[in-house]
Image (tube, helix red, strand yellow):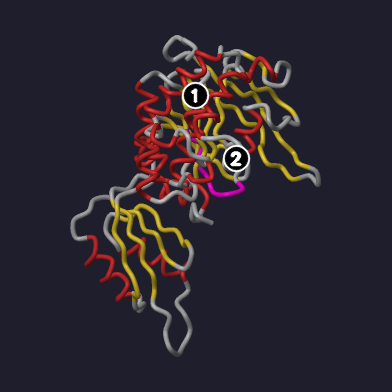
Amino acid sequence: MTTTPPDAVVIRTESLTKVYPGGVLAVDSLDLEVRAGEIFGLLGPNGAGKSTTAGMLTTRILPTSGRAVVGGVDVVEHPAAAKQHIGVVPQTNTLDRALTVGENLYFHGRFFGFTGRDARCESDRLLERFRLAERADAPVTALSGGMAQRLMVARAVMHRPAILFLDEPTAGLDPQSRIALWEILGELHDDGQTILLTTHHMEEADQLCHRLAIIDHGRVLALDTPERLKASVGADTIVTVTPAIPDDGPSPELGAFAADLAARVPGATAAEVVDGAVVLGIGGAQGVVPAVVGAAEASGVALSDLRVAEPTLETVFIQLTGKDLRE
């Protein structure tokens, strides 16, 4: 792995923009800095511009305008040099199906200039570390989704890049495989690996990232640590209130209901209408449920569901955009 001074800026973008044919603005004047040794996340819904951003930073997508410097190299002016500093795990499985598990690593090492002996030694080491040694001679088609993803991460770090990029690394994985991959990424970080990942899973961003940028429609809406982002909500408790749909008569008007709850519930700090429910932010936690139920009764609204939770990154996204992160 390339040695970089702690806290040095290893990724910098200046007004980075991508407009696809037809005038589709995917990334809009992105200014970003990522420091050495951190796990940095791009969090947002599908179509937010996360993968396009990662594609530009890894030389796969040519920016329309702006600048991106990765590992001290301008990715547009010197793409071949930039690739020496990066490892990439894309969303799709790009393993060579004509090769065995071990051969996928061996030939990757040879491509990056390893001698045959060094490529073999490093392949064996990585197979052990990524818990794939028993599958070394198996075809990659025999791997589970989680194993295939671990192999792609092993291949991406084989040449010891300064920065590892992962695009939606756990999409489609079962919970056990997801946690296993999180553990491996944590181990890589403990070794000093800088990691940039894109994700739409708030739990993944909260669990892994030291800092993250919340992105929607190609723009950064907020950037900070997960803890500070959640604190920015200004509430200790989040209550999601879903009105019942009456068998006869009109459905409750959610905007008016949200205003009623905000006015009637002690400590209410905000109320947003999201996906057929009212999301209510409240300072404090004691007595929240009876207070909300009482306020709903006073408003003449019956409830079908009521959920209480602490603020999450999804809460932050809802406050910033007025919509659910999954939309």
Q: Establish if 187 lies above or below 241.
A: above
Q: Is 141 rendered above or below residue 127?
A: below
Left or right, 167 with respect to 81, comes to left
The foreground one among 55 and 187 is: 187
> Residues in magenta?
41-47
Front one among 2 and 103: 103
Q: Which residue is mark 1?
A: 157
In the rendered image, which residue does mark 2 sit on? 97
Provide residue 270's location: percent of width, then percent of height: 39, 54
Q: CA distance from mark 1 to mark 2?
A: 20 Å
- Quadrant assignment, res 313: top left
Residue 296 at x, y percent in the picture? 32, 72
Residue 258 locus on image (x, y percent):
41, 65
Label drawn at residue 272? none
Count of marks placed on residues? 2
Task: Please tell me whether residue 114 is drawn above or below residue 169 in the rendered image.
Answer: above
Q: Is residue 63 left or right of residue 88?
A: right
The secondary structure type at the circle numbered 2 is loop
Residue at image position (30%, 54%) is: 309
Please report the residue visible at 37 percent of the width from the left and 27 percent of the height from the top: 129
| Quadrant of the rendered image containing residue 180 | top left
In depth, the one of 199 and 215 nearer the eye is: 199
Image coordinates for residue 251, horizontal then vertical, percent: 47, 80
Q: Mark 2: which amino acid?
A: Arg
